[in-house]
Amino acid sequence: MALLMLENVSVAYDNQYILQNFHLHIERGQLISLLGPSGCGKTTTLRLIAGFLEAKDGRFLFEGKDYTRVPVNKRNFGFVFQSYALFPHLSVYDNVAFGLRLRKASESEVKKRVTAILDVVSLGGFEKRFSKELSGGQRQRVAIARALVIEPDLLLFDEPLSNLDANLRINMRVEIRRIQQELGITTVYVSHDQEECFSISDQVAIMNKGVIEQLDAPATIFKYPKTEFIARFIGFTNFIAFGERTEQNGQIILRTGNHTFVAANHPGTANPSGKKCALRPDDLLVTTEDAQDVNRLQGIVKVSTFLGRSYQYVVETELGDFTVNQEMETPYRSGQKVNLLFPKDKMVLVD
Amino acid sequence: MQEKNRGLALFTLLVFLFLLGPLLIISFTSFEPGTVLKFPPEGFSWRWYENILEVEMFMTTFKTSMFVSLAGNLLALALGIPAAYALSRFQFKGKAALNAIFISPVLIPGIVMGFAMLKYVIIVYDLPIYAGLLAGHTVLMLPFIIRVVASSLANFDFAVEEAALSLGAGRLETFFKVVLPNIRSGIIAAILIAFLESFNNVDISVFMTGPGVSTLPIQMLTYVENNFDPTIAAISVLLMIVTAILMFIIERLIGLSYFTKR
């Protein structure tokens, strides 16, 4: 059984549902990210798990026990805030010791554990400093240490890196992943930064309008998005909506108007209701030759821009505009007639 | 340019003279050795300062004033801090209205407040004078406490409170261990501001005092009706010094700009 289970949960503000019939299962020891645009309900989900919000309906099970009505301070979950939320009136040492003292640990025990955890986050020697004397990255590490020292059953991150600058963000996310794996602690991580989530997570849940549209390993999502929303979210820019989908000789035949396309059978086309073809700009091919018959579409180069390594073309066709990136020596001119080729095995079919 | 600055400096000087002149005159006259207020004084003596201690009513009313201002302060804190916390922390229906009600004692003329309190506290509910006086001063101080505490809570990141909860602290424990220590200077400033308002208050006290119970400012008023000696000047100087010291502390804690933002 999963460690954490949200079953049929609903959350509403002023009769406006943010989450409705929401389900989420998390296995022990995993780092799972909730990713999505602002307002998609990811922070609400996290705050619900933490206990800052109460579910209107549904159940929250943790280790098989009903946690739905357990108050925050009885849950033993560590929470790391976007604003760090260090206690401004306490030193680094006292900040980290706060949770231990509430648990009535002896001062020698407190000292031992605080020192040990400050070493884990590489902040040994900073015990006497106050929050305002630390940099953003150091503050966040204190916040992580403070959440970890109580040996929480679950660690929760709410956009912990979004107030840091770009280089620090990359260092810190590696750090977070290292600590998480070292301690083997189950973690839920919320962010709107795709790269951040994909790089550190075992599983990513992409959320939209209060619903998880896909929950998979990062590489799976990256290659085989299930819905158009996810496809667009992770960089698929080209779409063709087909009216008809049939299977023939282990291939998938797609028709729209008088155009017929063929897609190979792979995990990205397995969804039987997927009738919309998605392609990344890097996976389309542009050519002036007429060689191939299937999966070919005639068009005219509308815009041609130089991206450094490759050229990017916007090609106008009967089925709409397509964006293509292609590395080449001499670029096509605007207004030039070209053929677009759709590789069978790169086509992904989404809802 | 030079000319214009000199004009401005002169103007500023005149304004200062206008504002501080009476205080300076009072200060000088308090050292008058004769029995009648005179400016400039004809000599130098501490005799009227000594007289303060000799007039028994000044000492009793001073004690009453101190008691009412300090005890009222505690009551106003007990009511005002939770109110300020609720107004800053939560969103709820009628919040704006509540805010307005809590601030209203500042906006309503003191004389109206005083009369209304007299009507209800003394006449309708027939409270003892001492209790009525205390109630009046609590109401008087409440808006100052709420405003100053709320403005220091406005700079408080409530995520800090959630952090304490997530670490296992209960709601009350969080309030005392995390919220209070971080708004400490705001609370001290609130106490001092409310104290000054209450200690110097005349318009509410005048309705709430009665036979045998009076505050220092009221006693001073009564005294000048019958006496013309410089004792009042001496008391005024002492009050000015105390006020100046308290103001200095407030300035250190939250800045005097608080008073100009009203």
Image (cartoon, rainbow, N blue to C red):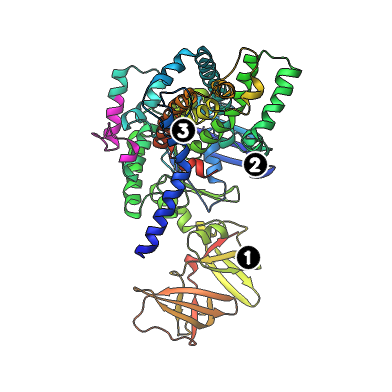
Let me know if residue B37 is in the magenta part: no
Q: Is residue A182 above or below residue A227?
A: above
- Kindly indicate whether the residues beneath marks 3 and 1 are on one polypeptide chain: no
Residue B47: give x, y in percent of width and height: 40, 19
Does the CB distance between marks 2 and 3 fall below 8 Å?
no
The circle on residue A245 is: 1
Q: Amino acid at mark 3?
A: Gly
- Kindly indicate whether the residues beneath marks 2 and 3 are on one polypeptide chain: no
Which of the two discs, 2 and 1, labels the residue nearer the N terminus? 2
Kindly report the distance in space between the C-alpha atoms of the residues bearing marks 3 and 1: 69 Å
Q: Is residue B56 above or below residue A195?
A: above
Asked which quadrant contains residue A249, the reply is: bottom right
Question: Mark 3 sits on what residue?
Answer: B186
- Magenta residues (range): A113-133
**Mark 2 element type:** strand
The circle on residue A13 is: 2
Comparing labels 3 and 1, the label whose residue is closer to the camera? 3
| Residue B249 appears in view | yes
